[in-house]
């Protein structure tokens, strides 16, 4: 029984085991089949070609969509990759449109990539028209909004700092809305304007400043700008004639689009700015020790008990915000964009602030079956400025650190001040820095509007012919008041101050041109001819009334009105043969009311030739080179912005309030006859340019190299005139010449380009040498030049000079002598002319503030939703005169008249100078530097709120660090004389951008 049962159980067990094994085997086989089906790898091969000419494309990236797996084409355009059937392959290459292909059952996939219109066919705005980038014959740099610098940017010029070869942008300081000094291939003038012409949506702006505004460009919202195109050589700029010697910057604002639906974008940014450091001065304890050792009993007696860091008292951490809202799209087939913005920027110098409200409207309808295009652009801004009294910067360096901020009484606003024995302020002593800030109210409101309407009509009966009409304006209105109470020590002698000023500027524009474009296929040619007319008028009216605080005594009442007009005729012809040979001719004839009728008109021609070698048979099918273009050009441009509207006319100038004539008890304003040059005329700059543009397919490397030579003639210079021959002994007239020459290099490299990770780097370098070649009518070896560059500490003292054979603004100094230990010997200089006397004849020209080389390097990386970028730039060979040290670096500086004492620079411990040595080259410093301009990290939420909203977060740091040997606060000083400039802060920003 037991055995039987055992046998049956054993039989059943064996049966169950066989079933279990069969089941497991079946499941294993099913899993294997599924795995094989799911993970089967098919080898896909193919060739990638250029759709334009069928040539193979090496270096094309083939990426599995959504994965990091990928490969690249070989030198003959072939590739091989193992992928699953359901894979999507992404084919991408710089300058070509990206293409996606589903593998399916295919084993051979050949692909042709089209040119990317946004890159190879990119349309670049040029003067009075546009042109494909690949067809340019001149030197033009195009920067769009994607490549702009990020961060707390209040002025458009800051968007392209470090981005463009040949363009040097130097901040004028760290005040809210402060502008920059822009130089394109060096300055072309000594006494006329050196700023480039700026054109916004076809409206050329007036280069003169706007009263009550930190800079004219600060009235324009950078968030509304789509692109900036910079015209550098004469073949590109000569179309603007008399205003193009210093280059041209074309700004295009953002527009709406017919494609897509309504788009709403909101951006918000909060920023924190802080000082990068303080100017070195003696601490309170160091100052006490020094006074006890070197001061008199009376000076020791006035030492205070406080320990005040005056620079900490005047600076602060400053908060700023920037908010922008835009709506764009198409309404009944009419593209439009509307935006509003508000920026509130505090400065790190206490009390300084800028609040800007801006708005813009743009509509671009197309009528008459696309034959008539209309562009309407309206931009407006209202800016409220509060200007800090920057005199507090120098006062904080010099003021006695042993004194308290407050005096403990109500005299002079309660601030501690240096007083005479009669209890009145010592007028030659430094003022209390905090008092200077808090007792000065300097406010302005500036309103500006820029607008135009442009009609572009393509003729029905001759579609190759277009007529373009553009009418525009640029108007501004300024109202400002500066008030200092009578109780303030700073203006005690005049019973305070109240200055009220106004300014109204009107810039009216009208231009018209015809443009004829014709393809002549039978002779492989294309012609593009344009001719036009322009009228622009500038009117400025202003008032300035200065009284005491109560308004009972008037010191200045000077209404002012001035006007100048430009009338121009211009033309351009572009000729292309076989899409390889390009010719450009331009000419402009300008008439300016700034000159007398005999010199009023000037003609400014240019010519350029380009050869696209990549279109030649020996390179057309190259697997290596995708672009190789040689360019040469020559042109003449002019300069009519000489700073005066009536320099050729006899005129009278009203006397200042301190130069009035007294009759009895009444003071009368007198009129003074001014010297004038009836024959004053244009400055003229001839520019030659040779360049090469290149791009390599497989290496993903592109760039350009340019050599330029600029020669300015009829250069305006102030020269002495014989007694009795004019109404002055110094006259501004056309006598000189000056040259700039240099080399520019621009490189763009894409080392990694995959579906998820993309890395782009760009580098630019510029070498520029400036030299004055003539300053007088006759060659006069004894003529030393023109003294310029005023410095603090010496009345009427200058430290720079314009001399023939040297760069403009060369330093004019004495060569310091040193002892055996390397210490400077006070008052002892090298007798350079060997006459045994040390005087002005021993001064020599030494270096200049302009760098010989300036560099820019920027990198942008994106990985999935992350992005990271930075901009690094530098100057090499720029020198700075440290006027802070020279005016505060001698023991005599602590010994003030009438009993006051002042702080010193610690440099006095090294030099041991008893008296100031203002003209010693001891204070010349090499200010070469490398600066991390900004670093940006961002993250994009691509599927936010169900794919309906795109959101991006970013963090930016600006002015991150500077590597330099210069001992002052900032090695980058516009003009090269460091004298208590408003410091540029380090700024941290957090931003949010939402679009739907």
Image (cartoon, rainbow, N blue to C red):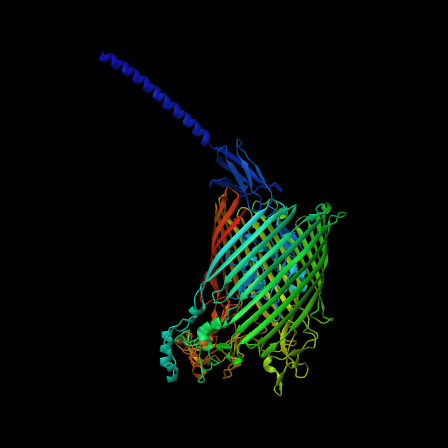
Q: Is residue 883 left or right of residue 602?
A: left
- Residue 440 percent coordinates (x, y): 51, 72
- Tell which residue pokes out farthest to the bottom in this image: 664
Q: How many marks?
A: 0
- Residue drawn at point x = 47 percent, y = 40 percent: 67
Quarter holding the N terminus is top left
Residue 655 pos. (x, y %): 63, 80
Where does the image place residue 638, in percent across and percent down from the top left? 66, 66
In the displayed structure, would residue 719 be above or below residue 92? Answer: below
Q: As rendered, which of 531 and 431 lies closer to the eye?
A: 431
Answer above or below: position of 553 versus 929.
below
Q: Residue furthest right?
A: 461
Q: Position of residue 403 (x, y in %)?
A: 40, 76
Q: Choose top left, top right, bottom left or bottom right for residue 968.
A: bottom left
Q: Nearer the viewer, residue 617 or 574?
A: 574
Report the residue at 65% width, 69% height from top: 541
Identify whether 63 is placed above or below 267. above
Residue 577 seen by the camera: yes
Can see residue 642?
A: no
Q: Please name whichever residue, 680 or 657, is drawn nearer the observer in this view of the structure.
A: 657
| Outermost residue toward the left in this view | 2
> Which picture quadrant has residue 155?
bottom right
In the displayed structure, does residue 148 sit left or right of residue 124?
A: left
């Amino acid at each position: 029984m037991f055995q039987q049962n055992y046998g049956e159980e054993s039989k059943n067990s064996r049966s169950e085991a066989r079933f279990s094994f069969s089941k497991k085997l079946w499941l294993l086989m099913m899993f294997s089949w599924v795995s094989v089906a799911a993970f089967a790898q098919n080898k896909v091969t193919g060739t990638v070609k250029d759709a334009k000419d069928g040539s193979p494309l090496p270096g094309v990236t083939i990426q599995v969509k959504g994965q990091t797996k990928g490969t690249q084409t070989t030198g003959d355009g072939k590739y091989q990759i193992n992928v699953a059937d359901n894979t999507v392959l992404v084919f991408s290459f710089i300058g070509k449109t990206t293409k996606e292909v589903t593998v399916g059952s295919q084993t051979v996939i050949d692909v042709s990539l089209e040119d990317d219109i946004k890159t190879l066919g990119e349309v670049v705005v040029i003067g009075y028209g546009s042109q494909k980038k690949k067809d340019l014959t001149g030197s033009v740099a195009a920067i769009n909004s994607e490549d702009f610098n990020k961060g707390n940017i209040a002025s458009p010029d800051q968007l392209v700092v470090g981005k463009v070869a040949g363009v040097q942008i130097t901040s004028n300081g760290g005040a809210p809305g402060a502008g920059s000094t822009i130089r394109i291939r060096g300055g072309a003038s000594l006494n006329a304007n050196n700023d480039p012409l700026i054109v916004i949506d076809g409206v050329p702006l007036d280069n003169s400043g706007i009263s009550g505004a930190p800079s004219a460009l600060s009235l324009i919202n950078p968030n509304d700008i789509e692109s900036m195109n910079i015209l550098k050589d004469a073949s590109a700029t000569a179309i603007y004639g008399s205003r193009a010697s210093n280059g041209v910057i074309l700004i295009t604002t953002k527009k709406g689009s017919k494609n897509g639906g309504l788009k709403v974008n909101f951006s918000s940014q909060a920023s924190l700015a802080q000082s990068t450091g303080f100017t070195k001065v003696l601490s309170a304890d160091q100052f006490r020790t020094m006074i006890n050792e070197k001061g008199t009993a009376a000076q020791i007696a006035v030492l205070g008990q406080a320990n005040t860091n005056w620079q900490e008292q005047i600076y602060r951490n400053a908060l700023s915000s920037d908010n922008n809202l835009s709506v764009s799209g198409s309404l009944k087939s009419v593209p439009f964009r509307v935006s509003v913005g508000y920026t509130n920027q505090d400065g790190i110098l206490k009390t300084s602030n800028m609040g800007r409200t801006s708005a813009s409207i743009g509509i671009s309808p197309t009528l008459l079956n696309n034959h008539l295009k209309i562009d309407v652009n309206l931009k407006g801004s209202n800016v409220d400025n509060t200007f800090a009294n920057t005199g507090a910067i120098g006062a904080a360096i010099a003021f006695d650190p042993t004194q308290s901020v407050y005096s403990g009484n109500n005299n002079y606003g309660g601030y501690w001040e240096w007083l005479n024995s009669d209890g009145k302020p010592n007028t030659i002593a430094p003022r209390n820095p905090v008092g200077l800030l808090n007792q000065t109210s300097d406010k302005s409101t500036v309103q500006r509007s820029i607008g135009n309407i442009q009609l572009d009509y393509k003729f029905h009966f001759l579609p190759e012919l277009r007529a373009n009409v553009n009418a525009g304006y640029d108007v501004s209105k300024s109202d400002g008041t500066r008030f200092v109470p009578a109780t303030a020590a700073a203006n005690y002698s005049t019973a305070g101050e109240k200055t009220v000023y106004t300014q109204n500027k009107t810039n009216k524009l009208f231009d018209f041109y015809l443009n004829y474009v014709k393809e002549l296929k039978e002779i492989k040619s294309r012609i593009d001819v344009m001719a036009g007319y322009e009228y622009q008028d500038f009117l400025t009216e202003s008032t300035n009334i200065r009284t005491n605080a109560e308004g009972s005594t008037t010191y200045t009442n000077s209404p002012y009105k001035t006007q100048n007009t430009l009338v121009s005729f211009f033309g351009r012809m572009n000729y292309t043969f076989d899409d390889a040979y390009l010719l450009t001719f331009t000419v402009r004839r300008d008439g300016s009311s700034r000159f007398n009728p005999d010199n009023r008109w000037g003609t400014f021609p240019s010519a350029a030739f380009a050869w696209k070698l990549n279109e030649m048979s020996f390179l057309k099918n190259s697997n290596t080179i995708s672009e190789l273009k040689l360019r040469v050009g020559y042109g003449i441009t002019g300069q009519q912005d000489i700073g005066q509207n009536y320099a050729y006319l006899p005129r009278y100038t009203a006397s200042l309030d301190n130069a009035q004539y007294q009759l009895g008890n009444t003071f009368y304003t007198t009129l003074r006859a001014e010297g004038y040059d009836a024959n004053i005329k244009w400055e003229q700059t001839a520019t030659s340019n040779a360049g090469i543009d290149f791009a390599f397919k497989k290496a993903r490397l592109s760039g350009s190299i340019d050599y330029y030579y600029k020669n300015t003639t009829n250069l305006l210079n102030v020269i002495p005139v014989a007694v009795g021959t004019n109404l002055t002994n110094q006259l501004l007239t056309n006598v000189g010449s000056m040259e700039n020459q240099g080399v520019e290099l621009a490189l763009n490299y894409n080392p990694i380009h995959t579906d998820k990770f993309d890395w782009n780097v760009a580098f630019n370098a510029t070498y520029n040498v400036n030299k004055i070649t003539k300053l007088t009518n006759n060659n006069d070896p004894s003529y030393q030049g023109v003294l310029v560059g005023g410095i603090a500490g010496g009345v009427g003292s200058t430290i720079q000079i314009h001399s023939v054979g040297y760069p403009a603004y060369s330093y004019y100094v004495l060569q310091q002598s040193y002892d055996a230990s390397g210490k400077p010997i006070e008052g002892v200089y090298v007798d350079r002319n060997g006459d045994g006397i040390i005087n002005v004849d021993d001064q020599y020209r030494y270096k200049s503030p302009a760098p010989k080389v300036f560099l820019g390097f920027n990198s942008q990386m994106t990985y999935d939703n992350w992005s990271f970028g930075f901009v690094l730039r530098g100057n090499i060979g720029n020198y700075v005169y440290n006027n802070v040290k020279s005016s505060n670096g001698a023991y005599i500086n602590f010994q003030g008249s009438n009993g006051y004492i002042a702080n010193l620079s610690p440099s006095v411990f090294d030099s041991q100078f008893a008296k100031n040595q203002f003209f010693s080259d001891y204070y010349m410093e090499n200010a070469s530097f490398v600066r991390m301009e900004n670093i940006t990290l961002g993250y994009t939420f691509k599927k936010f709120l169900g794919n309906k909203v795109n959101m991006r977060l970013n963090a930016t740091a600006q002015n991150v660090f500077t590597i330099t040997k210069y001992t002052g606060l900032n090695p980058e000083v516009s003009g090269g004389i460091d004298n208590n400039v408003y410091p540029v802060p380090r700024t941290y920003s957090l931003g949010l951008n939402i679009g739907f």
